[in-house]
Image: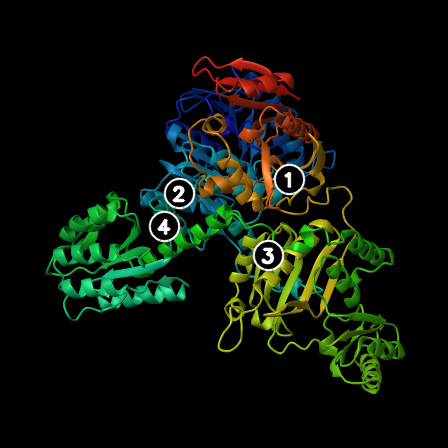
Amino acid sequence: MSVRNLQHLFAPRSVAIIGASARPNSVGATVLRNVIEGGFSGAVYPVNPKYDTLSGLPVYARVSALPAAPDLAIICTPPATVPGLVRQLGEAGTRAAIILTAGLSALHDSQGRTLRQAALDAARPYTLRLLGPNCVGLLVPGIGLNASFAHTGALPGKIAFVSQSGALVTGVLDWAKSRGIGFSKFISLGDSADIDFGDLLDYLASDPHTSAILLYMEDVRHARKFMSAARAAARSKPTLVLKAGRVAEGAKAAASHTGALAGSDDVYDAAIRRAGMLRVLGTEDLFAAVATLAHARPLFGERLVILTNGGGPGVMATDAVVSGKGSMAQLAPDTVARLDAVLPSTWSGANPVDIIGDAPVQRYVDALNIVLQDPQADAILFIHAPTAIVPSLEIARAIAPLAKASSRNILACWLGGDAVAEARAIFTEAGIPSFGTPEEAVSAYLQIVQYRRNQNLLMQVPPAACDDALADGAANPAAARALVHAALASGRTLLSEPETKAVLAAYGVAVVQTRSTASVEEAVAAAREIGFPVALKILSPDITHKSDMGGVALDLEDADAVRAVAQRMNKRLAELQPQARLEGFSVQQMARRPEAHELIIGVATDPVFGPVILFGQGGIAVEVTADHAVALPPLNVVLARDLISRTRVARLLAGYRNRPPANMDAIIATLMRVSHMVADLPELVELDINPLLVDSDGALALDARMRVAIADQSASTLDRLAIRPYPHELEERIDWHGASLLLRPIQPEDGPAHVTFFNALSDDDVRYRMFVRVRELNASQLARFTQIDYDREMAFIATRPGPDGVNETLGVARVVCDPDNVAAEFAVTVRSDLKGQGLGQVLMEKLIAYCRSRGTREIVGEALPQNTRITKLARKLGFEISKAAEDGSVHMRLPL
């Protein structure tokens, strides 16, 4: 369930208040007063058997006595009454209710259910949507609806605010009202028994009254649903998150470094980033970011120029940029020369551009004009400290038109209070974000930068897959599964190092040659076969970190050294951990790579978002260096490169002094192969590759461990992933006029082929598909077509190798489902030179079969009246065809 019936929650024509009261300071009295005083124009029905009238309104004794089914009901009665009231409302025809009552999860009914579950069960047969329980309610200022017990109302505006914290709801309402900030929707989620973040993101993403979405989040319960909704919402409007609980309560016990390092806040950070949203760290930052992003221009780069009339504020702003990992622009020589001509000789001569405190109005205008023409200046921060020489108001009037007309992002900092109030107002009216301190202004700019970076992750089209070992079928998932299942069958959840390396090798990860041995003499024999020098390690399921127990020895040059070290390890283990089981020794070839970096790549399983992939600096001090980043699978080249870039070690990998750059393609390929493992092996719980040695020649896994568990057989193996990976099972080979075609879901890597496909369409075919004339696909359109959410939509392409050996796209059939999987809208396009050969029908039949398999109720589509080919095909496939009277467009519908 997702957006079903939410229109009754946000745009009701009538409201019932169950538990309305005259008792001072009661919830029922407060809600009734708020609904009436808010200016709601619809019918209001108080319900309480104790009263005949309240606030001049007739009161009804029970739900069945109401003159009509209310669109929305607000329940503020004791917990035990709630499930019965929900059932009565459902029977009456109400389709949305707000449960303000708390304590439903702690109390049980006669059947042993919590009252929370009993209320859900009562609502389900009627698809009656529940907000809460234990919430403050909601406000829709645009229609005068204050369905809450908040102490104040909200101003109308274009921002939607959704909060899990009731206390924050009332605090933010107060804070926002004092600053003139208005809202389209203001929602308290409470315990989210039914309506949750995913539902509201889906609704608000298409809400015409909302231009930005703000979330105060404490936790997410349905990760797949949340990620699908968040990615869709973030594509259409700025979506910002204030996530509570940034500080870890302590490292959790884990069998791997990765399990200990991948804290839940890191995972939330990765999820927010992957969805294209922006995370902020405080309430003021949340609303400042909205104001900034609302006026932000396209960001073509991240280099900032600071223009100021005071050296101190310029230095403060520069410190804030550098400490925030921002980028200061280097002024072009021509810019410096032009500034020399209009500024005093004492000007700073560089960025920040200090035009000196005695600057007249014209000096501001000249300096800003020059800086705006510098190709290095991606954005400008204007800082002004008031002086007695020139009124700030005159400066604002002179430069506001320049700033407003610029294609670059310009932010302003007007230092002071009353002296600059009018100047700040002029800039605000011109749509130029203005701030009171340099640090606030820089923070806002860095928010723009980070938001654009996150959006770029949504929009970037990766190159064709670089992972040849996976692309050509060299991976052997069956071998990996056999190893995992054998370990579980023997009662083990920890794979030995050699077993883990065998699993990695099955996915094409380069591993150092390793043998498992059961005794000292077997270890000696294995060392002779591998060739000296070798490394020797103990094999024990009870020892997590072998080096801590003296269980690792390197550079053993001969058989005597191996024998002696193995015997010492036996003795040491017996002394330090006599209860530990010694299963033998691991013998591996010594890897001579003196210039290699030690990295870690791992997998951990988050209780909310499922498997996550970690990358960072490795070695035995991995917890101490704490240099790592986390990402949600599945990964592609763009996402893998971004994951690497978020670590400090990334700068070392780029090379320095006489040390050549590391082989980035090898690191990316390893990350992608691990991502494939995560999708293929539902039993995988934790994985460490540490260290992964990487130099200019490539990557080599030196040590590895893996923890597995029996997979949940009641759910799909892919349900544990927050983002559904590429569905290989939907690939199909067909014979088409003697040629072999592959029908498969589209991938992000199909971007270049999709551009070629689009360019091969005739003008009419483009117009039939997009309803307007489009000359070329822009970056966001291409990303939208190729980077689909397989949980919500599907695009099947027909592809074959082209004359140059590169796969070409011949046709595409696309379907986008609504969040409730009721209706799915389709489109089909075949390359113009291949029309009339039956390919469109082949693609549509595959699309229809897919929709049937996932339980979609109907497929619908729209077409221009001139597009007779598609209507003929639709009719042949059983679609009902009708014409819209208003514009003459053709409507197609296929009930499933």
For marks 2 and 1, the one nearer the N-term is 2
Instruction: Between residue 304 and residue 377, name the one nearer to us.
Output: 377
Mark 3 residue type: Ser
Residue wearing tag 3:
264
The residue carrying pointer 1 sits among few (fewer than 14), some (14 to 19) or many (20 or more) residues within 10 Å by Cα, namely some
For marks 4 and 3, the one nearer the N-term is 3
Give x and y (percent) for residue 419. 17, 55
4 and 3 marks in contact (CB < 8 Å): no
Colouring? rainbow
Residue wearing tag 2:
173
Q: Against 683, is 509 above or below?
A: below
How many marks do you count on the picture?
4
Q: Against 130, is 173 above or below?
A: below
State the residue at coordinates (82%, 73%).
580
- Quadrant placement of the N terminus: top right
Quarter residue 771 falls in? top left
Q: For the residues carrying marks 3 and 1, which lies nearer the camera in this image? A: 1
Looking at the rendered structure, the secondary structure element under dot 1 is strand
Looking at the rendered structure, the secondary structure element under dot 3 is helix
The residue carrying pointer 2 sits among few (fewer than 14), some (14 to 19) or many (20 or more) residues within 10 Å by Cα, namely many
Instruction: Between residue 3 and residue 750, name the one nearer to us.
Output: 750
3 and 2 marks in contact (CB < 8 Å): no
For marks 3 and 1, the one nearer the N-term is 3
As drawn, the residue found furthest toward the front would be 803
- Whole-angstrom CA distance, mark 3 to mark 2, is 29 Å
Mark 2 residue type: Leu
Residue wearing tag 1:
800
3 and 1 marks in contact (CB < 8 Å): no
Where residue 288 is drawn, which disc sits there?
4
For marks 3 and 2, the one nearer the N-term is 2
2 and 1 marks in contact (CB < 8 Å): no
- Quadrant placement of the C terminus: top right
